Image: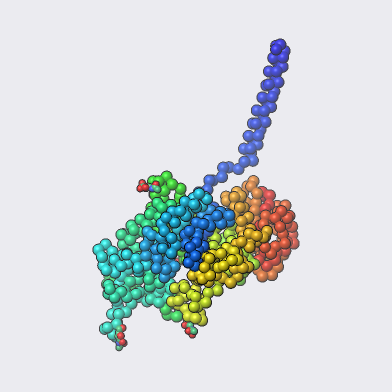
Amino acid sequence: MSWKKIVLSSVLTAVVVGVVVGVVVWAVMREEEVAPPELRKLDWWEHTVIYQIYPRSFKDYDGNGIGDLKGITQNLEHLVDAGVGALWMSPIFQSPMIDFGYDISDFYAIHDEYGTMEDFVELVKKAKELGLKVILDYVPNHASTYSDYFINSENRKQGYEDYFVWADYKVDPQNASARLVPSNWISQFGGSVWEWSEKRQQFYLHQFAIEQADFNFRNQAVKDEMVKIMLYWIEKGADGFRVDAIPHLFETAPDENGNYPDEPLSGNMFLRPDQAGYTTQIHVRDLIELYDVVYDWRTAVDEWAKQNGSETKVLLAEAYANISMTMLYYGDEKGRVGAHFPFNFDFITALSAKSSARDFAYVIRHWLTYMPQGRVANWVFGNHDQSRMPSRFRDDMVDGLNSLNMLLPGVAITYQGEEIGMRDGFVSWEDTKDVAALNQGNASNYLEFSRDPCRTPYHWNNSTSAGFSTNVTTWLPVAEDYKEINLQAQKDVSVSHFKIYQSLTKLRKEVALSHGEYDVQALTQNTLLLVRYLRTYDTYGLVFNVGTVADTINLSGITLLSEPLTVYTASVQSSRSPGNELPMENLTLQPGEVIVFKAPPT
Ligand SMILES: *[C@@H]1O[C@H](CO)[C@@H](O)[C@H](O)[C@H]1NC(C)=O
Ligand SMILES: *[C@@H]1O[C@H](CO)[C@@H](O)[C@H](O)[C@H]1NC(C)=O
Ligand SMILES: *[C@@H]1O[C@H](CO)[C@@H](O)[C@H](O)[C@H]1NC(C)=O
Ligand SMILES: *[C@@H]1O[C@H](CO)[C@@H](O)[C@H](O)[C@H]1NC(C)=O
């Protein structure tokens, strides 16, 4: 090579290198200019979808008409297919089934109708392989009267004497041989909370069924045992717990003479004297002491996770309480933390088919406003204690409600069947199994109390017993509409509640949904607008007509939204299809119609 060539090639090389470097630098700088600050990495539970399984009614593997663990294991793929991240199973522990598993007789064993410990281990193993977390139901408020705890306590066995809340009878000044209950407190399932024990010659307290005796949480041995139970199941592979009935953990203690105070009468004239609500419950729920126990549980599970270098174990609090008592489950002003979240039941307790878009906006903002800064919200549309979502609202609102669930910030919770729009089943008085209905109702009014209609078996397909069981007889009857509403039928068509549900869970991977801000407002009396947005990321939103008549809206004045709006998914009754462009003005929505759309970054 001549020197000229060398110089030339060096110059060329320098130019090429220079240009390349320049482009790279320019690209990096440009990248820095437009790339948003790093997004906070979310913990596994913070934006997941939790699917509640009612084990007795999910899938019957052995054909006895009762759901079981093998049935769940065999069908975990459905959960993956639906796009959920975690399952929560209502109680699977040994139980005489007075309250279908919420009356536990052995907290360390699997209920025999549901399977064995091996079946549980197998379920967890497969769930983990599929990337699903497993949340168990933890019932610390009470034990079955068939439990060893109770039998030992009733027999005053050493160490168990004060495991439950025992009290002497009150003397009747008019009748020396009568034994009066210690106070006028009424059980959640009707009747006095006090039940006489012939053996111990004392009353014990039960806030739910007679066979569900309340633990005495003022006894350290009980508190220790409860933590031991939680850690036992964590060791077996549980990823956390839904904690049952926490507001009832404590009752007011007796005075120094052993006397319990009565509650004032509520004055509610629609209730009988033996029905909960006849008195104002000031001594049997929301006692401030209970929060210390919840904060201690959190410490215990966090400590376990830290010691074992494991992922977060979650505590989800079931608490029907007012907003201030509910938010305290997150933690207190002193910086103590409790549950990862208390369930948000506002869609159940504060909204119905009669609610306007303004009611929806108000109720959604209510939770988000009261929630402590930096904590995670959640949304519940139904469960095993409440009328099913389409029955409480309307059939035509299924996709709209599922869309809200999936687009609102935080964790979405789905009760089995909501993904296909299952409605309450009809259960006759003769077939009624729920203790709440049997205790408080009769042949003409039991449906006011019964939780059986929301617990009928899952509809897999249109075959025998809706594919739930090979048995024509099932523990609760299969709802009559299973031929019309079932999973297989919805998989077989291109537009269905299930297909929409799948596309919604998929959408949750978008940054605007996992990390974004929210805006929620009523555009009209009946149409709700929810917008999720974050800086340079695509905006997503929905418009949902919660009313019973068509509604025409205008989106052109909404500053968060710019054209073009593209349909991402829409409800089954919608004439819009994914990919359609939406008009900003004169957009008409049918009753119950929802349109989920994408918009350019704000
Ligand atoms: C006194 O109480 C006993 C036990 O409950 C009852 O059998 C009896 O009838 C009562 N006597 C009167 C006079 O009410
Ligand atoms: C978790 O840590 C505890 C205490 O160090 C230990 O006894 C236990 O075996 C560990 N469990 C697992 C599953 O690693
Ligand atoms: C909630 O309930 C608690 C305990 O019963 C009561 O002290 C408080 O005033 C109530 N708060 C609201 C906002 O109703
Ligand atoms: C059922 O109970 C209600 C309320 O106590 C009562 O009014 C009604 O007569 C009862 N009906 C039957 C069929 O027993």
What is the residue that sits farthest to the left in this orientation? 158
Observer able to see residue 352: no
Residue drawn at x 41%, y 60% as measured from the top left: 110
Residue drawn at x 32%, y 64% as measured from the top left: 149
Is residue 358 left or right of 581 when viewed as pictured? left
From the top left corner, tell me how far across and down residue 559 is, in percent: 68, 54
The answer to which of 256 and 439 lies nearer the viewer is 439
Residue drawn at x 56%, y 57% as measured from the top left: 78
The answer to which of 130 and 102 lies nearer the viewer is 130
Which of the colour schemes (rainbow, by chain, secondary structure, one colour) is used? rainbow
Observer able to see residue 11: yes
The answer to which of 430 and 20 lies nearer the viewer is 430
Q: Quadrant of the N terminus?
A: top right
Q: In which quarter of the image is residue 557?
A: bottom right
Residue drawn at x 68%, y 67% as measured from the top left: 591
From the top left corner, tell me how far across and down residue 45 is, in percent: 50, 52
Ligand 1 picture quarter = bottom left
From the top left corner, tell me how far across and down residue 456 is, in percent: 53, 69
In the depicted structure, whether residue 380 falls above or below residue 180: above
Is residue 380 left or right of 166 when viewed as pictured? right
Q: Quadrant of residue 396?
A: bottom right
In the depicted structure, whether residue 170 falls above or below residue 217: below
From the top left corner, tell me how far across and down residue 464 is, in percent: 57, 67
